[in-house]
Each structure stands twice: as structure tokens, then as C-alpha cells.
Image (cartoon, rainbow, N blue to C red):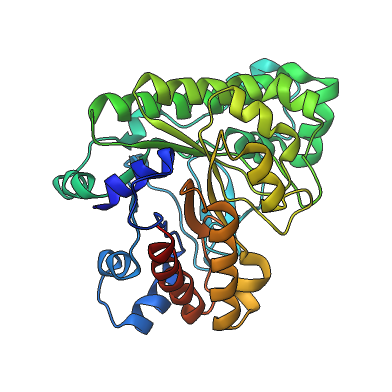
Amino acid sequence: MNSKERVRAAFSGSGYDRLPMWYGAEPDTTKNVMNLLDVKTEEELMQSLGADFRTIRPRYIGPELMVYEDGKFDTMWGIKRGYGYWGIALNTPLENAETVQDVENYPFPKVEWFDVNFTEEDKKLSEKYSILGGMWSPFWHDTMELLGLEKMFIYLLDKPAIVEAVLDRAFEFYYNVSVKTFDANPGLIDIFFFANDFGTQTGLFISPDMWRKFFKPRTKMLADLGHKYNLKVAMHSCGDIHQIIPDLIEIGIEILNPIQVSADNMDPVVLKREFGKDLVFFGAIDYNEILTNGSEDRVREETRRMIDILGYDGKYIVAPSHDLMMAEVPAINIWAMYDEAKNYSTMRA
């Protein structure tokens, strides 16, 4: 069974040789694991770990973006970021927007700034591995950073038209690049994987009703887009999102990531019992404490526990409860998670 077949089996929960596994990490983390396993390329590392997915996103080819001597950098959104691989927003370009026209006058990214065509190497990967594609599409985050978190919350109540204008421009950009991507690569992408972190450690950023008003319709449009192209649809959201999981199922989300089990109300036993018939869970091996601070034996124990809880029926993708592992995670713990998952889920198949 190759990786593509293994991932397909996760939707039926039967006929698999082991559970599928996903790897995602920032470059320094990947270098650490490559050194541990004595491999020369990231692709060799993915094969050594047994990763069943490859993520192929549109490639930025737009105007050159400034990278500063201190490591800070500009983004295509006009936001300066710093401190870490993805960094944090250091400015809020639309914080003084008072009208919809102020938003319309802002220089948003353009669809033509992205090359959506798969390379020959990409096409070869798609023959064997399950391909995650389309745009990451964090329209909530971009709106938050362009307006500023506090102002966005105030405007949701006081000047919702301004928030809607920013959301629309960010959403339309991502949507249109994804359409272009799917049109250019028929049959090569398996899963449309997009993200917005709607949850905090203790609940949603906004009320469920407000989420349903502003964000559910746009999220549904992304899910509908994936289904239009016969793709499975996966969504990423960190934090406690238990209140909107029924909504996500209703609008067509089939795979949920990263299952942040350290957040309130995200007990995997409860989630599996309540939503396991409708969702493939993707993630859940605790990043915050166990992968980052635990021993190798503790990581192996937790990996087995999550497989027993979420993967007993085969409808589970093994991964951490964080989409991008950082260099704070010991390389040996990363190896232990994949090694244990491969061996243990093979025994349970």
C-alpha cells in the first residue's frame, strides 16, 4: 500500500496497513531531525519518518519583499514581522481605516503574484503521496493583523462593514488563487487544506453566533470549492473550538487539524465519541508539553494512547497538536513519535 492509498483508507477506516502520518516543521527543526537520522535532504527525511503527505502550495513570484538585517521581514500584506520563523505582526496598516473606501484603497496582494503550476518533481510526488494543496487562506488572521486585534473586535460590533470589507478582500484573494491552482493541476491534489485559528486556550475568540455570522459562510465557500474539484477538505484551527465543530461538519469539513488536546474542552475521548463518525481527526499528539518537554518514552506512550483513542477505527492521521513543529522540540522526540506510530498502528491494523 502506498501513501496515497493509505490516506484514502483513513476515510473508510478499513483496509489499511498502518495509519497515515503527516510531518510539518520549521527549517531549523527539520535540520535537527535530518542530523539525527543522518539524511541529506528533506525528502529523504520524510521518507525515513514514513510521512504520507506532501504539501505543495502556490509559489510566490510577486514583488521582492524586504528582509532586514535584524531578521525582521515584510510580507505581501504590507505587514512587517519579526521574532521567530513566521514571526509576529509588528504593525497594523489599516488601524486608521474609518470607511470601506479606506479599505478599498489599500494595496492588497494580487493573484498573479503566485505561480500555481506543479513542477515535474511535484507531479512525481503526487503519484505516490497524498497531496495537500490550495492556499492556506488565513483570512481571519490577515484581517486581525491589518486592523489590529483590539480594533477588529470593536469594529465587529461598531463598524462591521469595515471588517467585512477587509475579510472580503483577503478571502477573495485566497479563494481565487486556489481556483487557479485547482484548474492548473487537475487530478494532482487530493486534499484542500486551509486554516484559521478561531480558538484560544479556553474558548473561541468571539461568540459562536458572531463566528456564524462573519466566518461560517466564508469557511463554507472554501469547503464547497474543494468539493467542486472532488477534493477532500481539511481545516486547521488551534485552540478550543468545540462549540463550532458541529457547524464545521455541517458545512463539509471532513478532516480536522490539529486537535489541541491541551486546550479546554478538547478531550480526544469526548471528541471521538461525539464527532468521530463524521470527521477524520488529524493531529492530537500533545505538542505543548509532551513533545516539547517529555522523555522519549513518554512521547511513545502518548502516541500509542492517541492511536488507541482516535485511531482504533482507522479514521485518524498521526501528527502533533501543532501544524509546524519548532526547534524547541527535541529531534529524538520527533523520531520517537513517528517510529512508534508506524510500528504500533501496523500491529493494530
**With respect to residue 9, does 206 lie above or below?**
above
Residue 57 seen in this snapshot: no
Q: Residue at x 38, y 63 (%)?
A: 346
- Name the image quarter holding the C terminus: bottom left
Q: Name the quadrant containing residue 160.
A: top right
Residue 9 placed where, x, y %? 36, 43
Q: Nearer the viewer, residue 306 or 108?
A: 306
Q: Nearer the viewer, residue 193 or 107?
A: 193
Q: Is residue 310 left or right of residue 66?
A: right
Q: How many marks on residues?
A: 0
Q: Nearer the viewer, residue 86 or 247?
A: 247
Q: Name the quadrant containing residue 262.
A: bottom right
Residue 85 placed where, x, y %? 52, 62
Q: Residue at x 52, y 66 (%)?
A: 71
Q: Residue at x 73, y 19 (%)?
A: 213
Q: Is residue 251 left or right of residue 182?
A: right
Residue 171 seen in this snapshot: yes
**With respect to residue 259, does 105 lie above or below?**
above
Residue 69 placed where, x, y %? 49, 67
Residue 194 placed where, x, y %? 49, 38
Q: Is residue 1 left or right of residue 238?
A: left
**With respect to residue 73, does 250 lie above or below?**
above
Q: Residue at x 65, y 48 (%)?
A: 238
Q: Is residue 272 left or right of residue 162?
A: left
